[in-house]
Image (cartoon, grey):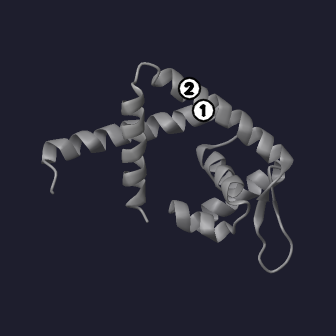
Amino acid sequence: MPADATVVDDILRELSLFARRVRALAHRLHPELSFVGYTLLAHVSATGGCLAGELASLYGLDKSTVSRQVGDLERRGLVVRETGPARLLRITPEGGAVLAAAAARQQQALRERVADWSEEDLATFARLLRRYNATFG
């Protein structure tokens, strides 16, 4: 069912505001990591290892951006690139600790923002976000 233009405009405005706030919040989660760096580190951790090209494809980033960000994560000792033909990226114990600390701050910030939401509202919000994100493939 096509959405009304006003509703679409409202959604786009809210998504834009959300994206700006997430980027601003990223610096507070871990001052030494960029939003992109945090996102890539989280994905490497969640997958147990991946290729840099997969990160570029998944997040719609230019390979040079991913290369720069991965290089920064490597220099900081947060990820390592395995030797061999696959050259998989893997998170280091230091990277895991940085990610865990940032995730704890992120979860606390979200809990504070939605403290007065009902469990039903939270479940609906999560379901709709999953549904929206699934449209990206």
Asked which secondary structure carries label 2, the reply is helix
Residue 108: x and y, percent? 60, 26
Read off the residue under disc 1.
Answer: 106
Q: Which residue is at the front of the view, 76 or 111? A: 111
Disc 2 residue type (three-letter): Ala
Q: Quadrant of the N terminus?
A: bottom left
Residue lying farthest front?
A: 120
Q: Between marks 2 and 1, how big is the CA–CA gap?
A: 5 Å
Give the vertical position of 54 relative to 133 (above or below).
below
The circle on residue 51 is none
Q: Can you tell which quarter of the image residue 31 is in?
A: top right
Give the vertical position of 19 relative to 74 (above or below).
above
Name the residue: 53% across, 60% down.
Answer: 59
Q: Is residue 62 visible?
A: no
Q: Residues within 10 Å of mark 1 (few under 14, many from 20)?
A: some
Q: Residues within 10 Å of mark 2 (few under 14, many from 20)?
A: some
Read off the residue under disc 2.
Answer: 109
Q: Can you tell which quarter of the image residue 105 is in?
A: top right
Disc 1 residue type (three-letter): Gln
Residue 26: x and y, percent? 59, 36
Q: Quadrant of the C terminus?
A: bottom left
Residue 98: x and y, percent? 76, 39
Give the vertical position of 56 relative to 2 (above or below).
below
Q: Is residue 77 visible?
A: yes
Q: Which residue is at the front of the view, 41 or 70? A: 41
Name the residue: 29% across, 44% down.
Answer: 12
Q: Can you tell which quarter of the image residue 94 is in?
A: top right
Check contact, mark 2 vs mark 1: CB within 8 A.
yes
Name the residue: 45% across, 37% down.
Answer: 20
Name the residue: 72% across, 41% down.
Answer: 99
Left or right of 6? Residue 69 is: right
Asked which secondary structure carries label 1, the reply is helix
